[in-house]
């Protein structure tokens, strides 16, 4: 049934959801302001480095086995002003709005009112892992949002009495976009579409159309791989499997051997791999599947069927990501699982509870208190995270002020053992390091040793001088980097070739004597 009135009503609902989603994006912007735009950047700097070296005349600059090309290209085409963290935060603000908008649309389609929809969307948004991801610039947030929205559109197409073809095309395109931001989103999209084809066999043509659309979008990455001299699906994900089996000292990544293929890593130590694998699977699969429990108690057959689809996906996806070392892998599917929990809880209330307690006065207040407690518990943890980020921001600002007073004009004139440190006003914003997960792409791209030498105190000092490093910034973590750095950190006033400057918090700063 359709008509002008219904179309106008539909557009009105879209506009209402668009405005209702704005406060979620505003919160992300406010967190950025409150933390002086200094939230954790995770893998952002690897993408930022790759973005700076993109050159259409050299297609090899577009390939990196750690990160797909999507987020990297976006960082390059966005206007550059001030700290690179600013446009990165802007991307997350837009992504948060998109996630909230799509979630509100799904909840309204399920028949929930405005206030219940906003409450449920707030619970998902404030869920600590989701909240931290949306506040962490980097490719993970985009992969999570695009995959979530793509899944919503696919489920809407599967459940609609007369779905339109473009729904499947749009869904597949979003899933492909997620894969352009994170490699593990590609097998995740494949698993999702395979389970959809198995559970909804009558809609297999639409699912195949979504798969084709996903393949077309991800074809951009395949083209980059082939044109830059790599195999169509080549990545460096064997390194993640290696981390899963072996304890890597991130200050000595140059000592990490060539890891070979994923299979060779697994076969090199089967017992260690299986031990880590099953422990990780036991953590990921229950976290993703537990929110589905209420779905199977519902009388709604369509809800149970879609929950079965998602359960099959969760099993396959958990089986894959349990092979690698990344606690963020659960984020890709977490918002959808939480949405299932909210929708099934509402269904149970409508079907089984509301009718039985309609004459009682206590259920509604108890429900309101329960929701308020959930929101409060999530918000409390989120606020603690924001406070922690703010403290780190003040600490890094204080360090930067000392560096400026000491005449530092280039961030690379500082050597640091804090692998998270970056600056606001000292380009290129990252100091010099040894090792570090954030700097793996630059090391690989330049085919160079992983940073300043830690072979000995003499080698370290000489390498610092050769690189133009003037100030050494040591933290308590320097013990893992080198014994001589930890000795210097603990005895700051008895050091040859270095003059102790000052202490900021637990950080100690030294000027190299020339």
Image: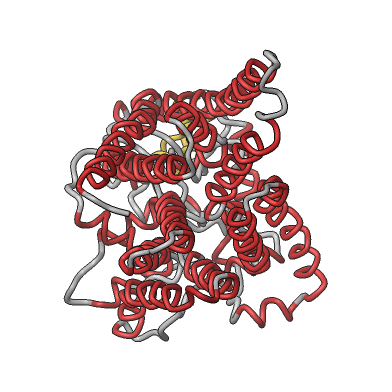
Asked if residue 69 is positioned above or below residue 108 in the image, the reply reads below
Q: Kindly identify the residue that appears in the image at 28 percent across and 44 percent down.
A: 10
Q: Quadrant of residue 218?
A: bottom left
Asked if residue 345 is positioned above or below residue 283 in the image, the reply reads above
Q: Nearer the viewer, residue 229 or 15?
A: 15
Measured as percent of width and height from the top left, residue 6 is found at 27, 45
Q: Quadrant of the C terminus?
A: top left
Q: Nearer the viewer, residue 245 or 506?
A: 245
Q: Kindly identify the residue that appears in the image at 67 percent across and 13 percent down.
A: 361
Extreme residue toward the top, this view: 361
Q: Quadrant of residue 129?
A: top right
Q: Is residue 217 left or right of residue 379?
A: left
Q: Kindly identify the residue that appears in the image at 49 percent across and 44 percent down.
A: 110
Asked if residue 245 is positioned above or below residue 28 in the image, the reply reads below
Asked if residue 456 is positioned above or below residue 412 in the image, the reply reads below
Measured as percent of width and height from the top left, residue 385 is found at 54, 29
Q: Kindly identify the residue that appears in the image at 27 percent across and 61 percent down.
A: 73
Q: Is residue 19 left or right of residue 358?
A: left
Q: Quadrant of the N terminus?
A: bottom left
Q: Nearer the viewer, residue 300 or 404?
A: 300
Colour convention: secondary structure
Q: Is residue 78 left or right of residue 311?
A: left
Q: Nearer the viewer, residue 295 or 484?
A: 295
Answer yes or no: is residue 357 visible: yes
Answer yes or no: is residue 508 visible: no
Measured as percent of width and height from the top left, residue 32 is found at 36, 30
């Amino acid at each position: 049934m359709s008509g002008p009135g219904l179309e106008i009503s539909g557009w009105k609902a879209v506009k209402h959801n668009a405005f209702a989603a704005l406060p979620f994006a505003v919160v992300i912007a406010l967190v950025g302001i409150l933390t002086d735009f200094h939230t954790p950047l995770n893998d952002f700097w690897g993408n930022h480095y790759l973005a700076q070296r993109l050159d259409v005349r050299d297609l090899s600059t577009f390939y990196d086995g750690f990160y797909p090309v999507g987020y990297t290209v976006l960082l390059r085409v966005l206007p550059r002003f001030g700290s690179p963290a600013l446009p990165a935060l802007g991307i997350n603000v837009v992504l948060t709005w998109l996630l909230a908008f799509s979630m509100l649309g799904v909840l309204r389609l399920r028949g929930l009112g405005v206030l219940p929809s906003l409450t449920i969307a707030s619970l998902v948004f404030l869920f600590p892992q989701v909240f931290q991801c949306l506040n962490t610039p980097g490719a993970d947030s985009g992969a999570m949002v695009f995959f979530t929205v793509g899944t919503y559109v696919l489920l809407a197409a599967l459940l609609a009495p007369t779905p339109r073809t473009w729904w499947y095309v749009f869904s597949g395109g979003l899933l492909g976009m997620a894969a352009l931001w994170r490699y593990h989103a590609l097998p995740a999209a494949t698993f999702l579409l395979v389970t959809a084809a198995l559970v909804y066999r009558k809609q297999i043509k639409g699912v195949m159309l979504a798969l084709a659309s996903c393949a077309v979008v991800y074809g951009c990455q395949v083209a980059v791989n082939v044109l830059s001299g790599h195999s169509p699906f080549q990545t460096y994900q064997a390194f993640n499997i290696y981390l899963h089996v072996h304890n890597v000292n991130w200050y000595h990544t140059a000592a990490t051997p060539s890891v070979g293929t994923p299979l060779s890593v697994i076969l090199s130590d089967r017992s260690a791999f299986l031990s880590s694998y099953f422990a990780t699977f036991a953590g990921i699969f229950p976290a993703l599947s537990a929110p589905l429990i209420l779905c199977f108690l519902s009388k709604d057959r369509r809800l149970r069927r879609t929950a079965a689809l998602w359960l099959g996906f969760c099993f396959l996806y958990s089986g894959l990501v349990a092979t690698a070392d990344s606690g963020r892998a659960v984020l890709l599917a977490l918002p959808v699982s939480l949405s299932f929990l909210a929708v099934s809880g509402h269904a149970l209330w409508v079907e089984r509870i509301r009718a039985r307690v309609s004459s009682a006065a206590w259920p509604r207040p108890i429900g309101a208190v329960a929701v308020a407690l959930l929101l409060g518990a999530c918000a409390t943890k989120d606020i603690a995270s924001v406070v922690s980020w703010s403290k780190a921001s003040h600490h890094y600002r204080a360090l930067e002020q000392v560096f400026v007073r000491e005449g530092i004009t280039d961030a690379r004139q500082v050597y640091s053992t804090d692998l998270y440190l970056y600056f606001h006003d000292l380009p290129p914003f990252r100091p010099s390091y040894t090792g570090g997960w954030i700097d793996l792409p630059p090391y690989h791209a330049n085919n160079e040793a992983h940073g300043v030498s830690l072979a000995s105190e003499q080698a370290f000092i000489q390498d610092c001088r050769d690189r133009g490093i003037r100030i050494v910034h040591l933290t308590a973590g320097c013990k893992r980097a080198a014994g001589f750095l930890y000795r210097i950190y603990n005895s700051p006033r008895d050091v040859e070739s270095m003059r102790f400057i000052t202490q900021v918090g637990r950080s100690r700063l030294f000027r190299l004597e020339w």
